[in-house]
Image (cartoon, grey):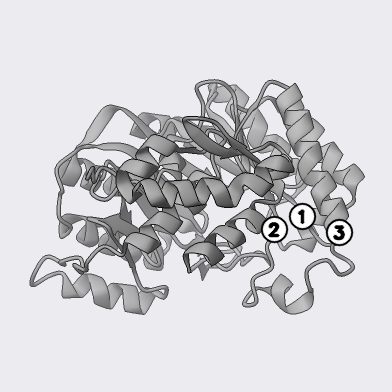
């Protein structure tokens, strides 16, 4: 039996930078709030965190291939001083090597960088940026607790033009409290007018631990209704594809040649390294998540001083891997290869899956060809949770 999807050698690394000016009302990520007055260039807690990241990278096992993608996420990685960012990249280069044609991405927020800082990013080899816009209305930015305003968004976009930084993505959120379909349309039109290489459109998810999760219930005022939220999704799909963007994943659109290669590693269920507070690794078929608080993370890194950390070995749970493969793969427009599915999980499971999905094929949500299964766009993507719930029930 082929085991290619079970044991891929990692060629990607995610680095979690937890620092933020404040916590947005929808955020449940592991972060450390530093406030508006702290100068990140002279902030001991950030310097200390970078030291521990370097230690963790140095004490990790190199499983054999140089890195093809690196992603700095957060948090707000643009709060890191350039010197600190350089130290992390140097540590990765020394430990694993970095391919000459690697994709190196960083998430940044308006109001946390300048044109000069973008030039410094380029000098470090960073060649892809994800800008957290979220909305083009000051009232909505304030509603969701963002630390930037509309003018800072436009200033940020002007910085990209000044330094000719072409490969950048813009993030938007739909379904925000009091957000109207007209405001969503305005945000989409402004994004299209800017013409980034990539656009991410996320529907608001209410997590119980967040401020929004404590204030609101899904589908209830002042949140848009389920029907309006669906209309927002269809509108984004229509406007962005008409503007020349490929809808290559449920929430993501790209110009030709500009799909996020790092995120494709996740959706294709390939292996990757993770470093930093709350970061996850997927190595040798095992997922491992680090502690979500700084003190616990530092204790973990200190435990690596005496002996390299050995990732836990456990027998592969074939059912879990099957469900992960389906859940992640069906997020992609091309869906899942039936040949690979049969090779890894067997003829009977593949045939049962096809039979299960026939009813969704008849209503147009699922497309089944001799070679692939994929969700239709937009309705298959829109109702993906219904399809996946049924799949999970079958294999439970």
Q: Is residue 295 above or below residue 311?
A: below
Mark 1 secondary-structure assignment: helix
Badge 1: few (under 14), some or many (20 or more) residues near its Cα, within 10 Å?
A: some
Badge 2: few (under 14), some or many (20 or more) residues near its Cα, within 10 Å?
A: many
Badge 3: few (under 14), some or many (20 or more) residues near its Cα, within 10 Å?
A: many
Q: Position of residue 392 (x, y in %)?
A: 53, 63
Quarter of the rendering containing residue 25: bottom right
Q: Which residue is mark 1?
A: 141
**Residue lying at 60% horizontally and 60% vertically, measured from the top left:** 390
Mark 2 secondary-structure assignment: loop
Residue 249 visible in rendering: yes
Q: For residue 27, which numbered disc appears in the image?
A: none
Is 47 left, or right, of 241 in this rendering?
A: left
Q: For residue 146, which numbered disc appears in the image?
A: 2
How far is disc 3 from disc 2 in space, using C-alphas? Answer: 20 Å
Mark positioned earlier in the residue sequence (1 or 2): 1
Quarter of the rendering containing residue 100: top left
Q: Is residue 120 above or below residue 220?
A: above
Q: Which residue is mark 3?
A: 224
**Residue lying at 48% horizontally and 45% vertically, measured from the top left:** 329
Mark positioned earlier in the residue sequence (1 or 3): 1
Is 222 left, or right, of 82 in this rendering?
A: right
């Amino acid at each position: 039996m082929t085991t290619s999807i079970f044991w891929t050698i990692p060629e990607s690394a995610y680095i979690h930078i937890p620092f933020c000016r404040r916590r947005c009302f929808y955020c449940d990520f592991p972060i450390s709030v530093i406030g508006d007055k702290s100068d990140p260039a002279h902030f001991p807690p950030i310097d200390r965190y970078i030291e521990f990241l370097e230690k963790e990278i140095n004490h990790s096992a190199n499983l054999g291939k140089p890195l093809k993608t690196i992603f700095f996420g957060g948090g707000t990685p643009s709060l890191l001083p350039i010197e600190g960012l350089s130290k992390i990249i140097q540590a990765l280069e020394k430990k694993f090597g970095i391919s000459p044609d690697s994709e190196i991405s960083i998430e940044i927020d308006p109001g946390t960088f300048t044109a000069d800082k973008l030039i410094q990013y380029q000098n470090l080899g960073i060649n892809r940026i994800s800008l957290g816009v979220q909305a083009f209305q000051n009232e909505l930015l304030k509603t969701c607790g963002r630390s930037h305003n509309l003018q800072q968004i436009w200033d940020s976009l002007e910085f990209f033009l000044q330094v000719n930084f072409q490969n950048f993505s813009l993030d938007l959120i739909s379904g925000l409290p009091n957000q109207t379909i007209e405001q969503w349309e305005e945000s989409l039109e402004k994004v299209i007018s800017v013409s980034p290489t990539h656009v991410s459109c996320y529907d608001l998810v209410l997590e119980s631990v967040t401020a929004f999760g404590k204030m609101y219930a899904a589908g209830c005022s002042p949140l848009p209704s389920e029907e309006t939220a669906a209309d927002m999704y269809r509108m984004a799909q229509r406007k962005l594809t008409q503007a020349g963007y490929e809808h290559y994943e449920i929430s993501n659109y790209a110009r030709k040649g500009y799909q996020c290669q790092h995120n494709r590693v996740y959706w294709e269920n390939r292996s990757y390294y993770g470093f930093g507070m709350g970061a996850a690794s997927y190595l040798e078929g095992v997922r491992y998540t680090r502690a979500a608080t700084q003190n616990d993370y530092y204790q973990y890194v200190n435990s690596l001083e005496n002996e390299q950390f050995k990732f836990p070995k456990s027998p592969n749970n074939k059912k879990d891997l099957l469900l992960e493969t389906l859940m992640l793969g069906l997020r992609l427009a091309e869906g899942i290869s039936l040949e690979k599915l049969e090779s890894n999980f067997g003829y009977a499971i593949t045939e049962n899956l096809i039979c299960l999905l026939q009813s969704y094929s008849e209503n147009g949500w699922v497309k089944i060809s001799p070679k692939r299964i994929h969700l239709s766009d937009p309705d298959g993507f829109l109702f993906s949770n219904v399809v996946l719930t049924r799949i999970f029930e079958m294999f439970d």
